[in-house]
């Protein structure tokens, strides 16, 4: 039994060093801003302090992230960061593209309106995700229209009208601001 355990070699998976370093850096930043973001109240019990639980979690994040980094550096004797680690980090960073799409949508809604922005971004995102057929692009447009009808019509979500609605005639402008 003990021979089997000794024969197993611990292999580091790609991206662990990059993840650990990033995690520790984020934890250090959070520890540094903790006094500015939380308060310590006089005459308040320790567990009721506004700073106590955030401090426990951020310090725990730093300690356990540091232990993970220490463990990963002990396993990697040749190089700390190799090509596979950088490739894995690139895969992680690629997800921020969709945050950019979301921000563009959020910035576009007050300018061009909820309906036009949704009808533009739904097929654009479908195209980006690889659904490039005519049928799927039309499905995304119909889905976008249904989302607008659901939010504005049934759920009565109040979303400000777009700036381009100001150029419409009065009656049409009111209709678009209320419904689209």
Image (spheres, rainbow, N blue to C red):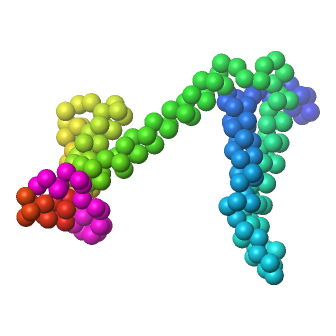
Residue furthest to the right in view is 2
- The image shows residue 58 at horizontal and vertical percentages of 74, 55
Residue 123, quarter of picture: top left
| Front position in the image: 163 or 132 | 163
Residue located at (36% from left, 50% from top): 106
| Front position in the image: 117 or 170 | 170
Say whether residue 153 is left or right of residue 77.
left
Say whether residue 176 is left or right of residue 118.
left
From where the camera sits, is residue 4 visible?
A: no
Q: Give the quadrant of the C terminus.
A: bottom left
159 shown above or below 98: below
Residue located at (55% from left, 30% from top): 91
Residue located at (29% from left, 37% from top): 124
- The image shows residue 57 at horizontal and vertical percentages of 74, 58
- The image shows residue 122 at horizontal and vertical percentages of 28, 43
Residue located at (70% from left, 65% from top): 38
From where the camera sits, is residue 101 visible?
A: yes
Residue furthest to the front in view is 167
Q: Give the quadrant of the N terminus.
A: top right
Residue furthest to the bottom in view is 43
142 shown above or below 4: below
Q: How many marks?
A: 0
- The image shows residue 168 at horizontal and vertical percentages of 11, 55
**Range of magenta residues:** 150-168
Please tell me whether residue 149 belongs to the stretch shown in magenta: no
| Front position in the image: 131 or 19 | 19
């Amino acid at each position: 039994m003990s021979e089997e355990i000794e024969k197993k070699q611990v292999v580091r998976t790609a991206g662990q060093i990059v993840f650990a370093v990033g995690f520790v850096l984020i934890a250090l930043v959070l520890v540094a801003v903790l006094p500015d973001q939380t308060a310590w109240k006089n005459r308040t019990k320790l567990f009721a302090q506004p700073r106590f639980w955030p401090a426990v979690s951020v310090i725990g994040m730093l300690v356990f992230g540091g232990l993970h980094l220490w463990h990963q550096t002990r396993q990697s004797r040749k190089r700390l960061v190799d090509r596979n680690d950088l490739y894995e980090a690139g895969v992680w960073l690629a997800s921020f593209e969709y945050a950019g799409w979301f921000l563009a949508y959020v910035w576009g809604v007050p300018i061009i309106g909820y309906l036009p922005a949704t009808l533009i971004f739904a097929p654009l995102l479908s195209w980006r995700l690889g659904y490039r057929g005519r049928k799927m692009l039309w499905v995304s447009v119909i889905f976008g229209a249904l989302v607008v009808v659901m939010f504005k019509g049934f759920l009565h979500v109040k979303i400000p009208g777009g700036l381009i609605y100001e150029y419409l005639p009065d009656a049409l402008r009111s209709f678009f601001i209320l419904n689209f």
